[in-house]
Amino acid sequence: MTGAARDVGARDLDARPVGAGAFADAVLALVAEIPPGRVMTYGDIAAVLGTNAPRAVGRVMSHEAHDVPWWRVIRASGAPVEALADRALARYRAEGTPLRGDRVDLRAARWSPLG
């Protein structure tokens, strides 16, 4: 990825419970920006937010992503979250997200707000 990362600060990652505060707000705002037919991985989101904490992104997504396009955030393998795979695959097909079998084609579908 190129460009400057968004700085949420180390305190934002450590001082709050899951789903609270600036880090969760930043994750959800970034996910809301992902265009239809495109995706980001948990690691992509963490990197854009200036951290190496994809699991923290996953925790926010698992607790608070009901109001954002959660299916556009995937594993680095291109696979959707297993428990939601059927729902995610239906949405990928409806949005025209490039697929390879039951996985997103990351080379074709990966998106970054940094260009």
Image: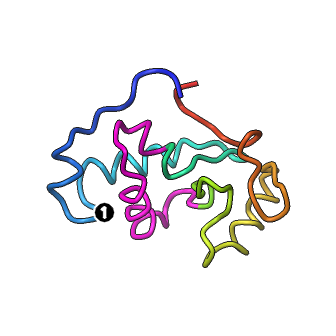
* Horizontal side, residue 3 vs residue 98: left or right: left
Q: Which residues are magenta?
A: 45-70
Q: For the stretch drawn in magenta, what is the main secondary structure? A: helix
- Whether residue 66 appears in magenta in the rendering, the answer is yes
Q: What residue do we see at 38% from left, 65% from top? A: 59
Q: Amino acid at mark 1?
A: Gly
Q: What residue do we see at 23% from left, 53% from top? A: 21
* Horizontal side, residue 80 vs residue 65: left or right: right
Depth check, front residue: 76 or 90: 76
Q: Kindly state the secondary structure of the residue where label 1 is placed.
A: loop
Residue 82 sits in quarter: bottom right
Residue 16 image point, x, y percent = 18, 59
Depth check, front residue: 71 or 9: 9
Determine which residue is flagged by label 1.
19
In the image, residue 98 above or below residue 93 = above
* Horizontal side, residue 114 vs residue 25: left or right: right
Characterize the local packing of mark 1: few (<14), some (14-19) or many (20 or more) Cα atoms within 10 angstroms.
many
* Horizontal side, residue 57 vs residue 113: left or right: left
In which quadrant is the C terminus drawn? top right
Residue 72 image point, x, y percent = 62, 54
Residue 23 image point, x, y percent = 30, 49
